Image (cartoon, rainbow, N blue to C red):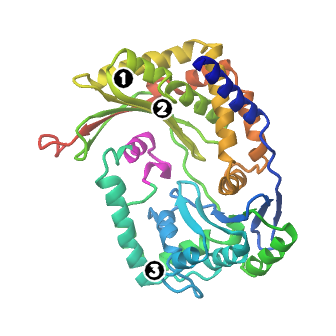
Amino acid sequence: MIKHLKMAALALVCSAAGTAQEVEFTEYNLDNGLHVILHQDNTTPVVTTSVMYDVGGKDRINGKTGFAHFFEHLLFDGTENIPKGKWMDIVNANGGTNNANTSNDRTYYYETFPSNNLKLGLWMESERMLHPKITQEGVDTQNEVVKEEKRLRMDNAPYGQFLSSVSENLFKKHPYKDPNIGYMDDLDAATLDEFNQYFDQYYAPNNAVLVVAGDIDIKETKKMIEDYFGPIPSGKKVSRNFPEEDPITQQINAKTYDSNIQIPALIQAYRTPGFQDKDSYVLNMISTYLSDGKSSVLYNKLVDDEKIALQVGAQNLEQSDYGIYFIFGLPLGENSLEAVSNSIDEEIAKLRTELISEKDFKKIQNKAENNFVNSNSSIAGVANSLARNYLLYGDTDLINEEIEIYRNITREDIRRVAQEYLKPNQRVVLDYLPETEDNKTE
């Protein structure tokens, strides 16, 4: 009976993925270069207004790091018409929620309001773009906020340094080598003029996309957008010329010490193609095969069967210029990092030489379709997908068509991608170790 229920549930998931409702949208440009995408869905009285800027941790000014993440905080500080510290109060008082996040490649701001507050959301985002107050007082305040965030999420968090340790060994030239949050010395040394220059360079309408999704009227919304965003002057075109990395041809061995952990970790990391490459999609499917759930290959092997690991996982960290594919494991008891690494290597070697089973392949295809449907199951999710697909992938239609990329991936593609990118001589192997009095000076 239980088996039949599970099969029925799986069939329902597959059916939902196969018949996902198409997301309709309208897109156009304002005269100042701002790209606008509108999605009308009047089923619930909510609306998301969002702006994604083409600026992230990889973008520097005078060689200094951390500016994009810093501005994620700074641009909530206030504007000419929103008093300092009142941004959140306005959102909360009008029944809304809001947030922002920064990656190495983009910065995203958004609000979700009851739909009768659409005009408020548009006004606030236009204020952020046109009238921010960038003052020394605000910079000093946010500097302390960013430092506290770094202490909380990186310096004092268990395994908080692992990604930055991987990146600094995987990249030698590209700015991906440095942490997205930046180096605090760079922010301390930055001048107010540099912060203003950075804003002028990257936070212009022609370097952004505005998405409005939810309970809207297209014609009325276009009029409001023209009123609020049309007068904002265009900025200079952003140009980038990041250096290319030399291929990794020999395994790089590295160590990192962390005073916040007691259990060491083994990390294998590979430099992979940017997310616009089809092979990045294949790597996502490989991650699902290797470590999505307790029935996955690595969990079954290292945790259940061999009992040499407490935890194991694989992830494709998608980025624009280069991706990072990493596999990690935490040894159980007296088992060594080498034992964990060798066991992982056995499964990766199979991926390079053998085709995965039809049963496993169908399973990961179903999960890809389910993830695709879930990513667009809310108005906020649709807004995010529309902005990301346009700004980063250069194809807004991916919100409806991306699933076809996964459907066209074959078992042969999985073997080919593993052969091309997941080779032992093309990786960083990082021993992430507890810090002790004996190794503090290493």
- Disc 3 to disc 1: CB gap under 8 Å: no
| Residue at the disc numbered 2 | 314
Residue 278 at least partly seen:
no
Q: Nearer the viewer, residue 411 or 68?
A: 411
Q: Position of residue 112 (x, y in %)?
A: 64, 65
Earlier sequence position, callout 3 versus callout 1: 3
- Please, what secondary structure does the residue beneath circle 2 have? strand
* Magenta portion: prevailing SS class: helix
Residues shaded magenta:
163-179
| Residue at the disc numbered 1 | 341
Which amino acid lies under the numbered mark 1 shown in the image of this protein? Ser
| Residue at the disc numbered 3 | 192
Which amino acid lies under the numbered mark 2 shown in the image of this protein? Ala
Quarter location, residue 244? top right
Tell me, yes or no, whether the highlighted magenta stretch contains residue 12: no
Q: Nearer the viewer, mark 3 or mark 2?
A: 2
Residue extending furthest toward the front: 1
- Please, what secondary structure does the residue beneath circle 1 have? helix
Q: Nearer the viewer, mark 3 or mark 1?
A: 1
Earlier sequence position, callout 3 versus callout 2: 3
Please identify the quadrant where the N terminus is shown.
Answer: top right
Q: Nearer the viewer, residue 237 or 133?
A: 133
The residue shown at (44%, 62%) is 65
- Please, what secondary structure does the residue beneath circle 3 have? helix
Q: Residues within 10 Å of mark 1 (few under 14, many from 20)?
A: some
Q: Nearer the viewer, mark 2 or mark 1?
A: 2
Q: Position of residue 122 (x, y in %)?
A: 70, 74
Residue 372 at least partly seen:
yes
Rendered position, 182 above or below 272: below
Quarter location, residue 251? top left
The residue shown at (23%, 25%) is 333
